[in-house]
Image (cartoon, grey):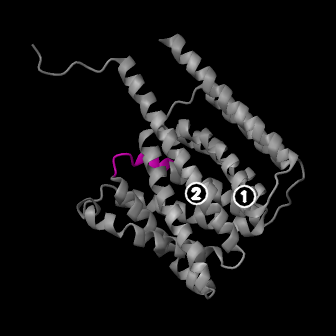
């Protein structure tokens, strides 16, 4: 008799995958609240005074201070990083995406930046298929396509003129999607190692540009700047946990929900009332996501 364990039944493997996907969704929602709700508001407020490179550098240095205890605790894993070059590539993409995003906040209205940013999940899904070999169901593609149609409703024809801000958003979408795909490909890497690479990498990559454009920081402004670093670091942990557990093609469409969080932050902190096209587009996005989830659940039950 063979001593090899019996292979896991396909149904059990499917249930485990769905459990991981559900947990990953919770982690990505936590990241959304911390970053889209909290950090974005602070960046918008400070971005009118301080350059994007400076904000990213300060965010990285503050984040580094917060994770110093983790660095000491996990020093063995850091010394034995499994994929140093892949981590460097991921962090480079993150640095370009984050700096572009901070720049876009200062050049375009917040609602426009967020609306254009919702093209990222669709790009991420396509990259997950091309680079990771993930399978995306027809229903999920249809749902993502309808959600993207909601983005187009928010923008409206001729609503945004071409400028540097749009190029910055384009950089955020492309390099942010590449960073997400690389994060998913590093599932076997230690989470703390990835956080350290991310934080130190941001600081190193943006150090020289930040020095060139540096503006003296007022003492009182250090309070919101500390908040940016703390919220960003906590969000980064949630983000990494999410993409280590769940499929990128599952988590990508959930990113559309951040419009609700961002709109609420804009209203609470800046008194911004979304235009009707923003409300209509958001409704299209939410309906598309919910309908896709319900139909996929029914299809899964039928397959059983």
Residue 177 seen by the camera: no
Q: Residue furthest right?
A: 158
Q: Please state the horizontal and vertical placement of residue 156, each as a whole percent of the image.
A: 87, 47
Estimate the x, y position of residue 296 in percent, counting from the top left: 59, 22
Residue count near mark 1 (Cα–Cα under 10 Å), binned few <14, some 14–19, many ≥20: few
Q: Examine the image and state in which quarter residue 217 appears.
A: bottom right
Residue 114: image quadrant is: bottom right
Magenta stretch bounds: 181-189
Q: Is residue 12 above or below residue 235?
A: above
- Across and down, in percent, residue 218 comes to 62, 86
**Quadrant holding the N terminus:** top left
Residue at 44 percent across and 55 percent down: it is 237
Mark 1 highlights which residue? 268
Residue 251 in view of the camera: yes
SS at circle 2? helix
Residue 283 image-quadrant placement: top right
Foreground residue, 265 or 237? Answer: 265
User: Which residue lies under the disc numbered 2?
Assistant: 35
The total of numbered circles placed on residues is: 2
Q: Residues within 10 Å of mark 2 (few under 14, many from 20)?
A: many
Q: Is residue 209 magenta?
A: no
Which residue is painted at 70% across and 36% down in the image?
286
Calculate the distance from the C-alpha at mark 2 to the C-alpha at mark 1: 15 Å
In the image, residue 182 sits, relative to residue 108, either above or below, namely above
231 in relation to 7, above or below: below
Disc on the earlier residue, 2 or 1: 2
Q: Nearer the viewer, mark 2 or mark 1?
A: 1
Residue at the image point whose x is 73% and y is 52% from the top: 263
164 lies left or right of 297? right
Judged from the image, the secondary structure of the residue bearing numbered disc 1 is helix
């Amino acid at each position: 008799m063979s001593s090899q364990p019996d292979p896991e039944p396909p149904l059990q493997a499917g249930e485990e995958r769905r459990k991981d996907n559900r947990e990953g969704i919770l982690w990505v929602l936590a990241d959304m609240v911390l970053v889209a709700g909290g950090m974005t508001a602070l960046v918008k407020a400070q971005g009118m005074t301080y350059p994007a490179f400076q904000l990213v550098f300060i965010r990285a240095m503050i984040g580094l201070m917060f994770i110093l205890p983790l660095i000491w605790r996990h020093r063995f894993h850091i010394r034995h990083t499994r994929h140093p070059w892949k981590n460097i590539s991921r962090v480079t993409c993150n640095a370009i995406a984050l700096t572009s995003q901070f720049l876009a906040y200062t050049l375009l209205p917040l609602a426009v930046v967020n609306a254009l940013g919702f093209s990222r999940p669709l790009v991420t899904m396509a990259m997950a298929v091309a680079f990771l070999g993930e399978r995306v169901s027809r229903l999920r593609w249809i749902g993502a396509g309808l959600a993207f149609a909601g983005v187009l409703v928010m923008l409206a024809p001729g609503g945004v003129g071409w400028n540097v801000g749009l190029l910055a958003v384009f950089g955020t979408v492309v390099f942010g999607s590449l960073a997400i795909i690389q994060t998913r490909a590093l599932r076997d890497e230690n989470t703390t190692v990835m956080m350290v690479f991310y934080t130190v990498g941001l600081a190193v990559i943006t150090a020289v540009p930040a020095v060139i454009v540096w503006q003296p920081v007022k003492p009182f402004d250090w309070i919101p700047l500390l908040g940016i670093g703390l919220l960003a670091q906590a969000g980064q942990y949630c983000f990494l946990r999410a993409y280590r557990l769940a499929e990128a093609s599952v988590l990508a469409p959930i990113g559309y929900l951040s419009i609700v969080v961002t709109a609420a932050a804009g209203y609470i902190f800046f008194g911004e009332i979304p235009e009707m096209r923003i409300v209509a587009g958001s409704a299209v996005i939410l309906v598309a996501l919910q309908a896709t989830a319900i139909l996929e659940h029914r299809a899964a039950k039928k397959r059983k």
